[in-house]
Amino acid sequence: MMCLKTLKLSLCLLITAAGVSSAANYQLDPSHTSVVFAVSHLGYSFTYGRFDKVSGSFVLSESDPSQHSFKVEIATDSIDTNDTKRDEHLRGADFFSAKQFPTITFESRSVTQIENGFALVGDMTMHGVTKSVPIELQFLGSGPGPGGGQRAGFLANFTVKRSDFGMSNMLPAIGDDITVMMSFEGVQQ
């Protein structure tokens, strides 16, 4: 219960300190935003990768968390698994088809406050397919940045099935469940 009170107070202070009467708009800081994923390989190990180009924004409402919104866009050709040959294969037609589908997007449709942050339900579009995806966001904190400006940060861990998005090549050798870890920091505009 104390965490919930602290979260509400932190968000209220964040928005009040910024002098915002109804909502605060944030742009993701690409230098402090990471999207990392893990996928099973043959059931023997996990391969980890990241996307190097991530952009987006979010809005925090002073009076009504259900009015918060979150948007993220990932450039599929920015995939990096520390293996050039594998990355080219992942960008190709067997997986992401990055030329045809250059982005992965997520846009929240509903936001509910929970004990440590927010429960989001949103539309994720990947490989030309849009699906509703639930994501829990942990509120990490807020305050002034080193160069000025108000900042707020969040952490999310969730799983999606790649086959739900039409990417079923090499199943089951390469796992269907993709674990995604995303940490992002926004700068108030």
Image: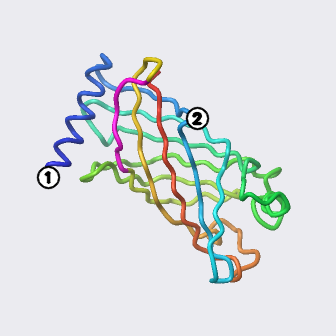
Amino acid at dot 1: Met
| The disc label shown at residue 31, or none | 2
Taking the magenta stretch, the answer to whether it contains residue 140 is yes
Q: Mark 2 falls on what kind of element?
A: helix
Residue 110 at x, y percent in the picture? 39, 49
Determine crowd level at label 1: few under 14, some 14-19, many 20+ residues with C-alpha closer than 10 A: few
What are the residue bounds of the magenta stretch?
138-145
Instruction: Decide which of 108, 28 is in the foreground and name it.
Output: 28
Please determine whether, in this image, residue 129 is positioned above or below residue 145: below
Colour approach in the figure: rainbow
Task: Name the residue located 67 percent from the left edge and 45 percent from the top edge.
Answer: 52
Residue 54 at x, y percent in the picture? 62, 41
Determine crowd level at label 2: few under 14, some 14-19, many 20+ residues with C-alpha closer than 10 A: few
Q: Does the magenta stretch mainly form a helix, a strand or a loop?
A: strand
Taking the magenta stretch, the answer to whether it contains residue 36 is no
Task: Name the residue located 76 percent from the left edge and 65 percent from the top edge.
Answer: 95
Residue 12 at x, y percent in the picture? 24, 30
Q: Image check: 84 left or right of 21?
A: right
Circle 2 or circle 1, nearest the eye: 2
Task: Name the residue located 44 percent from the left edge and 53 percent from the top edge.
Answer: 156
Circle 1 sits on which residue? Answer: 1
Please tell me in which quadrant of the rendered image residue 135 appears: bottom left
Residue 120 at x, y percent in the picture? 40, 52
Please determine whether, in this image, residue 54 is positioned above or below residue 171: above
Please tell me in which quadrant of the rendered image residue 75 appears: top right
C-alpha span from label 2 to label 1: 33 Å
Task: Name the residue located 71 percent from the left edge and 59 percent from the top edge.
Answer: 81
Instruction: Decide which of 106, 151 is in the foreground and name it.
Output: 151
Instruction: Decide which of 7, 96 is in the foreground and name it.
Output: 7
Q: Are marks 2 and 1 in contact (CB under 8 Å)?
A: no
